[in-house]
Structure formats: C-alpha cells, structure tokens
Image: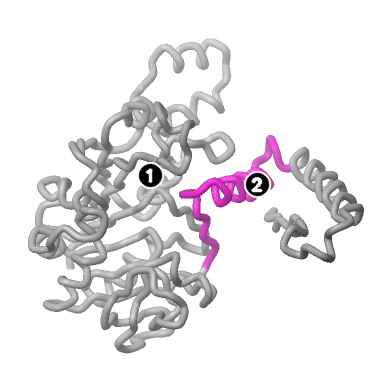
Amino acid sequence: MKKIRKAIIPAAGLGTRFLPATKALAKEMLPIVDKPTIQFIVEEARQAGIEDIVIVIGKNKRSIEDHFDANPELEDALSASHKDEMLDLVRQTTDMNLYFIRQSHPRGLGDAVLTAKDFIGNEPFMVMLGDDLNEGQTSLTQQLIKSYQKTGASTLGVMQVPHEETAKYGVIDPLTKVASDLYQVKRFVEKPQPENAPSDLAIIGRYLFTPEIFTALERTPIGKGNELQLTDAIDRLNQTQRVFAHRFEGQRYDVGNKLGWLETNIAYGLRHPETRDGLRAYLKTLTQLLDAEDAARPDKHSHPELKRPKLSVSVHH
C-alpha cells in the first residue's frame, strides 16, 4: 500500500464572508492570534508525515506565497537582535516542500482539486480545507491515514453534528458500520433539511482520496452554482469503488465565518502564553458586564430572543 506523501490545500476562494478585509488579503492569511490559518493546516500535514504540499491559489493570493517564502532581511535583523525564539518561528514557515498552482477561474472545490492532478500523479493524497482546524489526541489527517491503511480506499472525515444543523453540511448516508469510528458510505446528501437527513454525520474539511477521484472529477458535469462540485465527484467515485467515512472525535473549529473565527481566536488566545492570562481576566470582566446589562434590560422577558447568551469559554492548560 502506497504511503500518503502529498496533500492539496485549496486556497483560491474569494473569501467574500470576510470582506472588506479580504479584498486584498487572502482569507487563509487571517490570523488565529499570531499565526495565519493556513499555517495551521500546513503544520497538520507535516505532523502527519506529508512530504509535499501543493497550495492551489487564485488572484490576490500572493500573500500566501510571500508568507512561506524566505525573508533574509527579517532573519538577519532578528539574528542581530538575538531574538532567537522569533527567528525560529520565522524559519518554521520556510522549512518545507511547498508548491503553488494557479486556479485561473474559481470554478469550485472540485476544479481546484483537479487542477493539481499532474502534481499528485498516480498515488493517494490528502485534501485539506483551510476553513477547518481540529484538535484531538491525533489530528484528523493522521486518523484518516490510519483508516486508509486498513481499507485502502478513499476516506472522508465526518463529525457528529446537532440534528437541527444538518442543513449547513454535506451529510453521509451510511451503508454499514465497519468499526466504532468507520462507516462505508451508501450516498452523500448535500445540506439536507433535518427531516430529510439520513444521519447526523457531517463531512468536515479533510479528505483522503485514491487517484481515481481525478477520473470521477473529469466525468462529473458542472453542478450547483456553475461549479464542479467535489461531493458530486465523490458520489460518482462511490459507484465504482468503496468510499468510507471516519468519524472524528475531538474539537473542530470553523474559521470560515466571522463568528467561528472570533470563537477560535478566543479559544487559542486562552492557551497562548502571551495572551492567556490577560484574555481570561478580560473575559471574566466582560461576562459580568454582559450579565449586568441583561439584568437591567426591561424587555428581556417580553423579547426572549433579544436576551444575550452568557459567554462561556473552555480553558485548556
């Protein structure tokens, strides 16, 4: 069985949810505390044993290339100032095999993956989306590779979501439960209403594919939004070979929307040595202020939908 050596990180999207910040800055460069989102994805790939990473970029994504490029002037300045810890952080972004491919037109996730066909060649590979960060005893990428070593088949990362939220995700219809955390997939349903959802197992942003996915992509017609949908191609692949889903047990952070990005910054900020104490104190004060504001609001009972929820944050040491 071939080793998983390569990964695709699609980063050609327009990032419209974060406008105007993303008009000239790649969405993937928005920071989680002090580190761009895409760097977390690259680090996850490296820790899972991935050797070569291709990032599929589009217009106005030059900042991603610059971030992972060497900066001799900055390194010299940090070295001269004896800021060795910062120098190590800067060098971490350049010590890896990274390649860039341009997606000329944003034709969807499926097209972004297909753009990297020649780079991948005839071997299995990972697709890692930049909107999802995850934490567990091992990363979701490592878990998918372990599942692949058992099945030799394409395997997707899924996670149990609240039933009322199925309309936000692609959901799997399991055919059989192979192990406690592994399912063979019967079909995929894109964003079903709760009453129509075949399960609560939602696809999250990690995929492990065999190279046959490229043939499926080439034979898949343009779908919703006039884009080549990756989910449609996976469904086509599932007609000729088995596709599995691995249920992730851990913490997932959705940084693809404003609220999720803010929540992720708070969670990571509470663990960052430079921010955790100050942020924790600030959140305690803020919670007291919000509770006092809620208590003083005269219409809080007549308009329960306006009542501000309590701020609750879990702290990891």
Left or right of 257 on screen, residue 8 = left
Q: Nearer the viewer, residue 157 or 87?
A: 157
Q: Is residue 49 above or below residue 60?
A: below
Which residues are the magenta region?
250-276
- Queried whether the magenta region covers residue 277, the answer comes back as no
Judged from the image, the secondary structure of the residue bearing numbered disc 1 is: helix
Would residue 119 appear left or right of 259 to someone viewing this image? Answer: left
The first of marks 1 and 2 along the sequence is 1
Dot 1, how many residues are within 10 Å of its Cα: few (below 14), some (14-19), or many (20+)? Answer: many
Taking the spot 50% from the left edge, 15% from the top edge, the residue there is 79
- Asked if residue 240 is positioned above or below residue 111 in the image, the reply reads below
In the rendered image, residue 258 lying in the magenta stretch gets the answer yes
Mark 2, other Cα within 10 Å: few <14 / some 14–19 / many ≥20: many
The colour scheme used to paint the residues is: one colour
In front: 155, or 284? 284
Q: Nearer the viewer, mark 1 or mark 2?
A: 2
Query: Label 1 vs label 2: CA separation?
Result: 21 Å
Could you say where residue 266 lies in the image, as x and y percent from the top left? 65, 46
User: Can you say whether 290 is above or below 168 in the image?
Assistant: above
Q: Which residue is drawn at the image coordinates 54% and 26% (left, top)?
A: 86
In which quadrant will I find the N terminus?
A: bottom left
Residue 182 spot, x, y in % from top left: 37, 79
Q: Position of residue 204 (x, y in %)?
A: 40, 63
Amino acid residing under circle 1: Val
Task: Residue 42: give its label.
Answer: 1
**In the rendered image, which quarter is residue 269 located in?**
top right
- Asked if marks 1 and 2 touch (Cβ < 8 Å), the reply is no
Q: Report the residue at 32% width, 31% height from top.
A: 61
Res. 266 mark: 2
Task: Name which quarter of the figure residue 100 lies in.
Answer: top left
- Which of the pair 84/290 is nearer the observer? 290
